[in-house]
C-alpha cells in the first residue's frame, strides 16, 4: 500500500488566489497541521485567510491507495499516487465549494506545491495556487514569498506582478516522470523534457519528449496570456487556463492515438521548479498517470 508519508507535520505558506477567469484576487495565508491519530486515520487542522477564509479540521481514513475525507470541514475522496503526491475530489461544506486538487511534496521533503480548482456547480469561483514549507514543531514559519502589489492593480495583469509568464518562458523543463497504469500500479520512470520556443509575441512552440506518449511531440500554441490553445490541424490539440503565469490546467487530445490528457502544473515562487501531473484517458476510462518535478534551464 502506498501512503502519503511525506505530508506529516506542520506546514505554513502563502497562496495566490485567482478567479476562475485567471484574475488575481489576492494572497492567502495557509497553515496546516497533519498528524496520525491511529487506526489508519490522519487528522488535518487547516486555517486559510485570504479572498475567502476558512478554519477547521477533518479526518482522513486510509483505504489502500485511496483516502476518504470524513469531515467535518472536508468530505470526499483522494488518491495516493506516490509517497509525495495526492489527487483529490472533495467538498468543503462551510464554503459550499467543490474542489479538484493536487498536492505534491518536492524532493527535498520540505516544500509542498498545490493547485485547487474551487467550484460551485460547474462554475470555478476560485483557483488557489499554493506553496507551503515544513515548519519545525517548535519553530516559526519562514517569511512568505510575496509579489508586492494590490489586487486592484494586479487583477488586470495576467502575470500577477511578476513581469513574465513563468510557464511561457523560452527554455527547457527537464526531469523524470513517475509512470502509473490505469490501476495506479507502477510502470517505472521516464526521462522527460519540455522545450519552449517563441515564434511570435502571442505564439510559441512546445516540444514534448518522453513519458507515456513516448514519441517526440510538437505543439504550436496561441496565447492571450490568460489562456493558451492550439490552432487547427494539429495531432495534439487542446487548450489550458493560466493562473498568474505560474499554474495551468487544461485538456489535450492526442488525435492519432485516440487519447485525452488532463494536464496540471504549478511553478515554485522562484521559477526554478514545477510540479507536473498528467492523467491520460481513452473516452471516459483512465488509462495512465504520470507526474514529477521538473527543473527549468535556459
Image: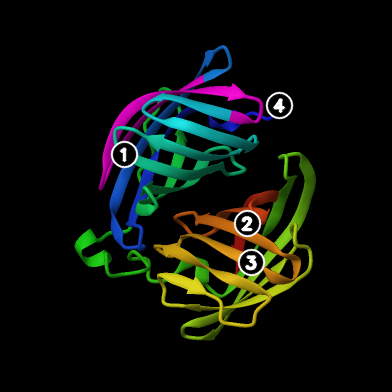
Extent of the magenta region: 42-66
The label on residue 96 is 1
Viewer-side label of 2, 3:
3
- Mark 4 in CB contact with mark 1 (< 8 angstroms): no
Which quadrant holds the C terminus? bottom right
The numbered mark, 3 or 1, whose residue comes first in the sequence reads 1
On whether residue 58 falls in the magenta region, the answer is yes
Q: CA distance from mark 4 to mark 1?
A: 33 Å
Q: Nearer the viewer, mark 1 or mark 2?
A: 1
**Horizontal and vertical percent for residue 78?**
55, 35
Q: Which residue is mark 3?
A: 253
Question: Judging from the image, what secondary structure is the residue with disc 4 in?
Answer: loop
Point out the tag, 4 or 1, that comes first from the N-terminus: 4
Q: How many numbered marks are there?
A: 4
Does residue 136 belong to the magenta stretch?
no
The residue indicated by pointer 2 is 294
* Mark nearer the N terminus (3 vs 4): 4
Mark positioned earlier in the residue sequence (4 or 2): 4
Q: Is residue 256 left or right of residue 61?
A: right
Whole-angstrom CA distance, mark 2 to mark 3, is 23 Å
How busy is the neighbourhood of tag 2: few (under 14 within 10 Å), some, or many (20 plus)? many
| In this picture, residue 177 sits left or right of residue 142 | right
Q: Answer yes or no: is residue 290 visible.
A: no
Name the secondary structure under disc 2.
strand
Q: Using the rendered view, name the quadrant where residue 92 is placed.
A: top left
Mark 1 residue element: loop
Q: Which residue is mark 4?
A: 1
Amino acid at each position: 500500500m502506498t501512503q502519503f508519508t511525506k505530508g506529516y507535520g506542520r506546514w505554513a505558506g502563502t497562496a495566490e488566489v485567482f478567479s476562475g477567469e485567471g484574475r488575481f484576487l489576492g494572497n492567502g495565508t495557509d497553515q496546516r497541521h497533519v498528524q496520525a491519530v491511529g487506526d489508519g486515520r490522519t487528522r488535518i487542522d487547516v486555517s486559510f485567510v485570504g479572498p475567502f477564509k476558512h478554519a477547521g479540521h477533518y479526518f482522513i481514513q486510509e483505504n489502500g491507495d485511496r483516502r476518504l475525507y470524513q469531515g467535518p470541514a472536508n468530505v470526499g475522496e483522494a488518491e495516493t499516487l506516490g509517497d509525495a503526491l495526492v489527487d483529490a475530489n472533495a467538498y468543503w461544506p462551510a464554503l459550499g465549494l467543490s474542489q479538484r486538487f493536487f498536492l505534491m511534496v518536492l524532493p527535498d521533503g520540505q516544500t509542498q506545491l498545490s493547485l485547487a480548482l474551487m467550484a460551485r456547480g460547474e462554475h470555478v469561483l476560485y483557483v488557489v495556487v499554493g506553496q507551503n514549507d515544513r515548519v519545525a514543531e517548535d519553530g516559526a514559519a519562514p517569511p512568505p514569498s510575496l509579489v508586492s502589489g494590490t489586487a486592484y492593480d494586479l487583477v488586470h495583469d495576467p502575470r500577477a506582478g511578476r513581469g513574465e509568464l513563468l510557464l511561457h518562458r523560452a527554455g527547457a523543463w527537464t526531469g523524470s516522470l513517475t509512470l502509473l497504469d490505469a490501476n495506479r500500479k507502477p510502470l517505472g520512470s521516464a526521462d522527460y523534457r519540455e522545450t519552449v520556443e517563441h515564434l511570435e509575441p502571442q505564439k510559441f512552440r512546445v516540444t514534448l519528449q518522453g513519458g507515456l506518449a513516448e514519441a517526440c511531440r510538437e505543439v504550436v500554441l496561441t496565447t492571450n496570456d490568460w489562456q493558451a490553445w492550439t490552432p487547427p490541424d494539429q495531432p495534439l490539440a487542446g487548450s489550458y487556463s493560466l493562473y498568474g503565469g505560474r499554474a495551468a490546467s487544461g485538456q489535450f487530445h492526442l488525435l492519432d492515438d485516440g487519447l485525452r490528457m488532463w494536464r496540471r502544473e504549478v511553478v515554485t515562487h522562484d521559477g526554478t521548479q514545477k510540479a507536473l501531473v498528467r492523467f491520460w484517458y481513452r473516452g471516459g476510462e483512465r488509462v495512465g498517470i504520470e507526474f514529477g518535478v521538473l527543473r527549468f534551464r535556459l
